[in-house]
Image: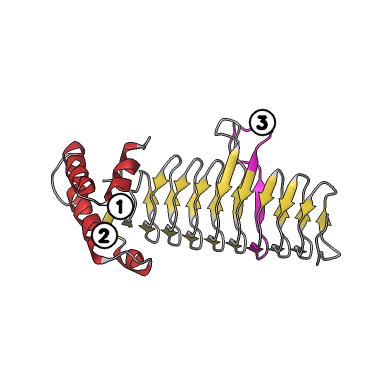
Amino acid sequence: MSGAGIHPTAVVEPSARLGEGVSIGAFTWIGAGVEIGDGTTIGPHCSVHGPTRIGRDNRIVGHAAIGGDPQDKKFRGEPVALEIGDRNLVREFVTLNRGTGDGGGLTRIGHDNWFLAYTHVAHDCVVGNHCVFSNNATLAGHVRVDDHVILSGFAGVHQFCRIGAHAFIGMGAFVNGDVPPFLMVAQDKYARPRGINAEGLKRRGFDSPRIAAIRRAYRALYMGDAKLDEARAELEEIATAGSADVRAMLDFIDGGERPLLR
């Protein structure tokens, strides 16, 4: 253990491994089987349960519960883990759970994400990079969230759903089906597509032709009376004409276990 800046009221179990420059706040508990990378800061009144591996330069503000047991009645104490990448921000009262034996045994979180107050990532979820979880956004178990996704406040995602890259989930939306990449979803009893996330795509450097192809694919999927197979055929034409983004949408659609949100 080579950590620095450990408050005298903090408890660090002997088997925990701390990198250089790690800071641990007052009344925080670091459990056995925890690894914390260089430069990570953990604030006061946090708990980190193992096995959990946290990367470099993360900032965990305070009162967060990291690596807790999965909230799953089938869990019987089998060895399961949580992995967190680098440069993530974890705000107050966030809960990030480990995986389950039946679900692969691992919850995995990437790099450069923001988890704002009271957000929750359940067992066996996979979260990509550069995502924002606004206050009280919640993932049930086995959810996959791809890169650059924004979940607005009080959004909730049903277990086993997938959220494609660059999607935007509106405030209070309850998502019970897969959301393809680039979509913007708003609440209407259950979440319903409301267009593409055009503003977010512009901010990330998508030019007009790319956005136009994505918009055409959205219209084929959501703005006509076409059945899914018919809409998919039109997306195939757009992808074949040179849109890698629409090809990514097709790959996403073909890889799902739950119905497509339509």
Q: Position of residue 126 (x, y in %)?
A: 51, 46
Residue ID at (45%, 62%): 153
Q: Position of residue 8 (x, y in %)?
A: 86, 65
Q: Position of residue 206 (x, y in %)?
A: 32, 64
Residue ID at (21%, 60%): 212
Q: Position of residue 129 (x, y in %)?
A: 50, 56
Extreme residue in the left direction: 225
**Residue 10 part of the magenta segment:** no
Q: Nearer the viewer, mark 1 or mark 3?
A: 1
The residue tagged with tag 2: helix, strand or loop?
Answer: helix
The residue tagged with tag 3: helix, strand or loop?
Answer: loop
The Cα–Cα distance between marks 2 and 3, rounded to whole angstroms, is 48 Å
Pointer 2 with pointer 3, Cβ within 8 A: no
Residue type at the position of mark 3: Arg
Q: Nearer the viewer, residue 244 or 164?
A: 244
Pointer 2 with pointer 1, Cβ within 8 A: yes
Residue that badge 3 annotates: 76
Q: Nearer the viewer, mark 2 or mark 3?
A: 2
Q: Is residue 252 above or below residue 138?
A: above
Residue that badge 2 annotates: 210
Lower sequence index among marks 2 and 1: 2
Q: Quadrant of residue 260?
A: top left
Badge number at residue 172: none
Pointer 1 with pointer 3, Cβ within 8 A: no
Lower sequence index among marks 2 and 3: 3
Position of residue 88 in the picture relative to residue 213 (left or right): right
Q: Is residue 236 above or below residue 155?
A: above
User: Bounds of the magenta span?
Assistant: 57-81
* Chief SS of the magenta region: loop
Badge number at residue 245: 1
The Cα–Cα distance between marks 1 and 3, rounded to whole angstroms, is 42 Å
